[in-house]
Amino acid sequence: MKAAPDKPLTRPQHLADAGLIPGDRVAALDSVTARFGMAVTPGMASLINPDDPADPIARQFVPDGAELREDPHDVSDPIGDSTHSPVPGIVHRYPDRVLLLPVRVCPVYCRFCFRRETIGSNEPEVLGDAALNTALGYIRDNTAVWEVILSGGDPFILSPRRLQHIVAELNSMDHVKVIRVHTRVPVVDPSRISDELITVFAESHKPVYVVLHTNHVRELTQPALDACKKLAAAGISLLSQSVLLRGVNDDAATLEALFRELVANGIKPYYLHHADRAPGTAHFRTSITRGQQLMRELRGRLSGLCLPEYVLDIPGGHGKTPLEADWVHRDTAGLKVMDYQGARHDYDEENE
């Protein structure tokens, strides 16, 4: 492999120049990136092993011709953001919480992203001042909103000044009690976790939860873990969310290693998402049955602290639903309770 790149890779030719793909693949991958954006940070590029055709880091970030295959299950807006967007920059799917989307770019573009039709596209990169004020006004006017989730795009690529404005506005709303941030930045571009950025959230009057997106233990480099420790030292609670991805983490040992490393560094695994049906992502999707098998196996191998909830965003915008196996079954004889090995046991609740 050639020397690690010193700036983001945004075209297939950059991947070839860095020795991450053969030069004869550039033309084919140009066709992929003409439709779906590409960005790989130097940190993530340095983790890719070009000699391993099954490298889990490359699979997440390097374009693949399979992305141009049409699948009858693909949906352009797989979780129904547009259905629940009353004003630009807001997704209001549940009564007590909203997504605030102030930015539509990320430091990396995951090849399985459920917003890939809008993130990194030709749409404006950030929500303009007028649109942001309208979005904040919507939150202010809807007093049932208890939690605001900053997502995107990746909110942590915004300037601390912009983030400070957003957090200050949310702090001024009495009905908003919790601020949550969904981000990949601490993992893929940890140098962005500056003291100035941390101060924005550390000085919030409301609790702040940062939910880290990570899918493989190799992503948790020492700089990434150091960035997370800085956030935690400032009093910011850390959770994680991952996506179950064929060829990346769809085996129990890989998930176990990831979840153990997260918890060992003070990060609670929160969600394991079943992969959404975004266009060009069929090659990443497992069956739900496989995901249930993995979660049952993990329950026998891991502490409860290490176990996320396995969930599906129901296509069409109907929200999340748990996907864990049916642990309790009732028949004419009473309750049967299943253990992590799949055996069912009678449970007598008569005297309870």
Image (tube, rainbow, N blue to C red):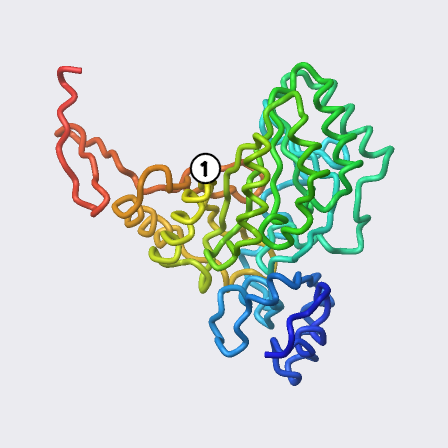
SS for callout 1: strand
Q: Is residue 72 above or below residue 259?
A: below
Screen quadrant of the N terminus: bottom right
Q: Quadrant of residue 94?
A: top right
| Residue matched to label 1 | 321
**Along the line of sight, the residue nearer the viewer: 162 or 91:** 162
Measuring 52% from the left and 57% from the top, which residue is drawn there?
219
Q: In the image, is 340 to the left or to the right of 244?
A: left
Neighbour tally class for label 1: few under 14, some 14-19, many 20 plus, Cα within 10 Å: few
Screen quadrant of the C terminus: top left
Measuring 20% from the left and 35% from the top, which residue is drawn there?
337
Measuring 46% from the left and 61% from the top, which residue is drawn there?
248
Q: Is residue 346 above or below residue 158?
A: above
What percent of the width, then of the height, locates residue 38?
69, 63
Q: Residue furthest right?
A: 130
Q: Quadrant of residue 325?
A: top left
What percent of the width, then of the height, locates residue 51?
51, 79
**Along the line of sight, the residue nearer the viewer: 137 or 236:** 236
**Along the line of sight, the residue nearer the viewer: 143 or 192:** 192
Q: In the image, is 22 to the left or to the right of 158?
A: left
Q: In the image, is 248 to the left or to the right of 164?
A: left
